Image (spheres, rainbow, N blue to C red):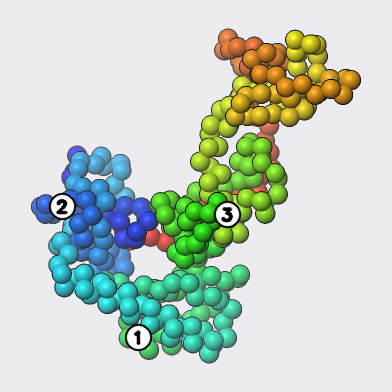
Amino acid sequence: MPIAVGVAFKRVARSYWFDPAGYELKEWDKVIVETTRGQEMGTVRIPPREVSEEDLQAPLKPILRPATAEDIEQYKQNLYLAKEAITICKAKILKHGLPMKLVHSEYAFDRSQLTFYFVAENRVDFRELVRDLAATFRTRIQLMQIGPRDQAKMMGGIGPCGLTLCCSTFLKELMPISMKMAKDQSLFLNPVKFSGMCGKLMCCLQYEHEMYKEARTRLPRIGETVQTPQGEGRVNDLNVLKEEVVVEFASGALVTYAASELQWERQVTGCACAAGAVSEAREEETAVVDEEVPDTDAYL
């Protein structure tokens, strides 16, 4: 198996595999590599190790060199120039009267390309803007429209929980989130209650979803008829974490039972499970899904 090193180009981002080219590299070393955007400075996140061929995204490109003090100084200067470029680009956007909001800009390490990230409600014809920017900065210009989740990841902020946003802290990839995840966790089916700073469903809904999903296979559904020690009743509510079931009787009385105390009709085919086992087959549900965000870190 080939030896590869994992390099990331942002503080919170996926790592890409490169050929270490004989260099002794360790985690957090800065390196210069060649990408589709030109030369870039990245950070070693995965030290050199054997990687199977199927895990490699493309033929390995070599590490050009470990970053020198001059390289690091140039990188810092690029950050400063990119901030200045935002001010100029905002003025150009106003000049052309385009309905777009500029979010971020970045130079390739060798300044062969200047990329601007923006958000807009609809597609924007920015061809004239690109020509204007290219004449101003004398380099290749790329304008990339991103979604609100990518915008939150770039800008950061504080979530409803009071902590810094997961996407700007440790989430390397943004996964699709659906209303079904909220329903499985017995949350209020009001998207406003569990929407993040980006206005989309919060990424943290996926953290415990598999646990809730698995726990629900051991519980009856709401509205299902169950047999209790006190007789037959109908499931009124569930406490998934405690695996407790609230049963309503014909008299209107509500009684809470452990799921292990109940019996109901559905059985898992071919599995002698405890009383109350349910079928893993679930009905198809219509779910509102936040679309997966395009990967804006495509360097290979």
Using the rendered view, name the quadrant where residue 276 is placed.
top right
Of badges 1 and 2, the one in the foreground is: 2
Would residue 63 be found to the left or right of residue 130 on screen? left
Instruction: Residue 159: give x, y in percent of width and height.
Output: 54, 56
Residue 298: where, in percent of width, then height? 37, 59
The amino acid type found where label 1 is placed reads Phe
Amino acid at pointer 3: Pro
Tell me: residue 23, above or below residue 146: above
Density class for disc 1 (Cα within 10 Å; few <14, some 14-19, many ≥20) is some
Whether residues under marks 1 and 2 lie with C-beta atoms below 8 angstroms apart, the answer is: no
* Residue 12 numbered tag: none
Amino acid type, mark 2: Leu
For label 3, count other residues whose C-alpha is less than 10 Å away and answer few (under 14), some (14-19) or many (20+).
few
Location of residue 219 with respect to 47 vertically, above or below: above
Q: Which residue is mark 1?
A: 137
Q: Image check: 109 left or right of 235?
A: left
Residue ID for mark 3 = 160
175 w.r.t. 228: above or below: below
Q: Nearer the viewer, residue 258 or 59?
A: 258
**Left or right: 230 with respect to 213?**
right
Disc 2: which residue: 25
Residue under the point 61% across and 46% down: 178
